[in-house]
Each structure stands twice: as structure tokens, then as C-alpha cells.
Image: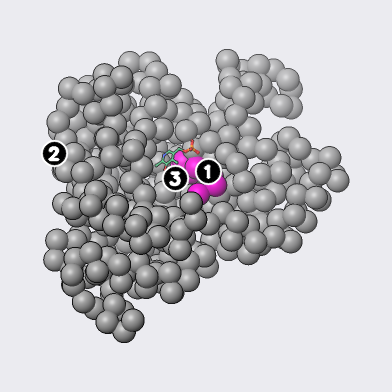
Amino acid sequence: MSYRVPFVDAAAHFRSMQSELLDAMTTSLLRGNLIMRDELKDFENSMARFVGTQYAVGVNSGTDAVHFALRAGGIQPGDEVITVSHGCIATVSAIVHAGARPVLVDVAEDCNMAMGRVAAAITPRTRAIVPVHLNGRSCDMARLTKIAQQHNLVVIEDASHALGAEFCGRQVGSFGMAGCFSLYPFKMLGACGDGGLVVTNDRYLARQVSVLRDYGQDRQTGEILCFGFNSRLDNIQAALLSVKLPYVPKWILRRREIAARYHDGLRSIPGLTLPHFSGDEYVDVYMNYCIRTSRRDELFRYLVDHSIEPLTPLSVVTPVHQHKALQLDHVSLPVTERIAKEFLYLPIHPELTDDQIDHVIACINGFYGTDNKVASSR
Ligand SMILES: *Cc1c(COP(=O)(O)O)cnc(C)c1O
């Protein structure tokens, strides 16, 4: 089915950079550069500069980025790691793969970790906190850093939703001992397949991650330093990502523009919560435009009927702690559970036209029987 307003448009995205991407790929192929070559090093250096850290290490996915960062950060079997249930299952899986026990805390109204809940979740076994900067908005890293320092905890940021987002003038990923990014095709910066990245200022951690991703070996000496994994970021993906990275600031501006347009067109609808949260310290990048309503399922169907493709990922509709097979269902997280019933993502990719955005605005106003400038001008 093809929508008038698709949730994402991978083909339009590719067309906007087609010749540059194909050139970069051809160059790598003609050089025979496929694994762990210059293109990967160049991309890692550019990413470290972009985020504002000393090191960046490419891996095969955001899941492995979190997993390896935790291991390299010294998390041991039996340790407890605090994170959220409203987020991505991959974050919690990565904690389990590192041998640790995930401790899930509730979120606040902005869908991010409720800092007031963190201190109460700390026990003598707690070793780390993994904040998830959801939907393109940073967590309150001032409060989180303070809590972590008071209790001597490692902070590993899951910044997979938020490349380029800022808190107090600093980019997410640069606050913790390490920052983790997914380069999955539909994230802020997406490969043409899977990819991930760990950024850090800690030389030892960067080295450990690069050993873990490559069979546990030291590439220079051939010495095996641990039982590792195979999770390299392919050279060709790195070359493609290097073409795309310079566009990220422009894409962020466009996402912020679209968010402002949605805000203008939707803000007077009673019963609809929009993702515009206060705080001068924050620069939000709107990875998702997450609206909330008690009539979510009805609105979802209405939008689909009007050729708009919203998204409510099923793995988020049921929060992590309520997936029975994971046996984490001993906790009750009221805000997480309420948001899960109410949230809906509107299309917000940078290739959207103003006409498409206005169609979404008009339809939502139509659903609520409300009127606005855009709707009435049609
Ligand atoms: C996408 C995502 C991941 C997982 O990344 P993959 O590259 O798909 O492994 C982890 N955490 C968050 C917050 C994500 O959005």
C-alpha cells in the first residue's frame, strides 16, 4: 500500500544523495576496501568530531554498541543496571547480554527516565545507569550525572534516537563514560543496512570495544585478548555514512521545522498532548514526533483511512516489563504503562513536503472536529 504521507521514504532519501552515495561505494569497491579499512577510520574520526568526543568505534548495531560499552565499562555478571521500560527492547537485551540484571524505572511526561525514580532503584549491586534519550530529546543529564557521581556509577548513554540532540550546549553521547548510537537505516543517521557506534573519551574503553567487535583480537599483534564477537561496521556502510553525515545538521533543522509546523496546527486540540516540552537547556531533534491521546487506536485507524501512515511499534505498545517471556513483570510503572496506551508517532522524516504535513494536520483536526488555519484554508 502506498500512502500519501508515508512514515518514512527510503527511496526519496536515497535519491536526494544518489550520485554521491554510488560514487563513494564504487570508490571503496574499486580500492578493494571492504573490512576495517580507511573508510571506517575516516567515518569514526568524523563521528567523534561531530559528537565532541575523542574516540568513536563502529560496530554492527546499536544493540552491540550498548552491549560492548557495558562490558568495556567494567559491568560484570550479577551487577544491576538501571534503565527504562519505555524505550527499545534492544537496550534491555544488551544489559542482559553483558551478564547484568536490568532494573527498570518509570519515565516522566517527556517519555525519558524519571530522575526522581533513579535514586530509589539504587542498591549495593547497582553498577551502571543507561539513560535512553527517547524520540530525539536528551535526558536531564545534569541530574543524572550528579546521581551517578554520588553513587559511583558508570553512565552509558543510549543515544540511538538522538544524534545531534543537546543538553546545556553539549551533544548527547558525550556525557557518559560512553555514548551509543544505532545506525539502523531509519535512525537520525542511517546506513543502508545495520550499523552502530560507541563514542567515548576513555582510551581504554575505545580499545576494548574495538577488540570485542573483532573476535577479541589485537589486529596489530594478532594476540587474542578475550573471547570476542564479530560485530564490525562494514567499510562500505562507513563510506556511505560519511557521505550522509554532513547532511545531519540540515536534516535536524528540517525535523525541527516540521515539529514547529505540527505544533502550530495541532496545539489547540483539547485532549492531544504534543511533544513540546519546556527547558532552555534542551535542543530536541525530533527523531519521532510523539503525540498522545486516550483515543489513540481510533485516531490511528482514521489516519490510515486518510492515506497517512502513523506508527505505534508493537514492541513499545507493550512496555518491556510487560512482555511475559522476559519475566520482568514484577514491576509496576504507571507512567510507562499509561504512555504505552496513548502514544502515536506522526511521520516526520526530512523528505516530507509542507503539503504532506498540512494534510496530516488537517486530518487530525478533522478527526477531532476542530478547526485551524490550515484546515479552514482548504
Ligand atoms: C534502534 C535502537 C536500538 C537498537 O539499535 P540496532 O541498531 O537496531 O541494534 C537501541 N536503542 C534504541 C533507543 C534504539 O532506538
Report if residue 361 lies within the magenta region.
no
Which tag is nearer the camera, tag 2 or tag 3?
2
Q: Is residue 126 visible?
A: no
Q: Of callouts 2 and 1, which one flags the residue occurring earlier in the amino acid sequence? A: 1
Q: CA distance from mark 2 to mark 3?
A: 25 Å
Tag 1's secondary structure? loop
Tag 2's secondary structure? helix
Q: Looking at the image, is 331 positioned above or below residue 117? A: above
Q: Position of residue 369 (x, y in %)?
A: 18, 70
Q: Position of residue 301 (x, y in %)?
A: 29, 52
Q: How is the image coloured?
A: one colour
Report if residue 184 lies within the magenta region.
yes
Mark 2 lies within 8 Å of ligand 1 (Cβ measured): no
Disc ID at residue 346: none
- Tell me, yes or no, whether the two marked residues, 2 and 1, touch with CB atoms within 8 Å: no
Q: Give the extent of the magenta segment.
A: 179-186
Q: Nearer the viewer, residue 148 or 34?
A: 34
Mark 2 highlights which residue?
A: 334
Please state the quadrant of the image where ligand 1 appears.
Answer: top left
Q: Residue at x 74, y 61 (%)?
A: 19
Mark 1 highlights which residue?
A: 184
Q: Of callouts 1 and 3, which one flags the residue occurring earlier in the amino acid sequence? A: 3
Q: Is residue 187 visible?
A: yes
Mark 1 lies within 8 Å of ligand 1 (Cβ measured): yes
Q: Position of residue 220 (x, y in %)?
A: 74, 27
Q: Please give the count of numbered marks on the rendered protein.
A: 3
Mark 3 highlights which residue?
A: 160
Mark 3 lies within 8 Å of ligand 1 (Cβ measured): yes
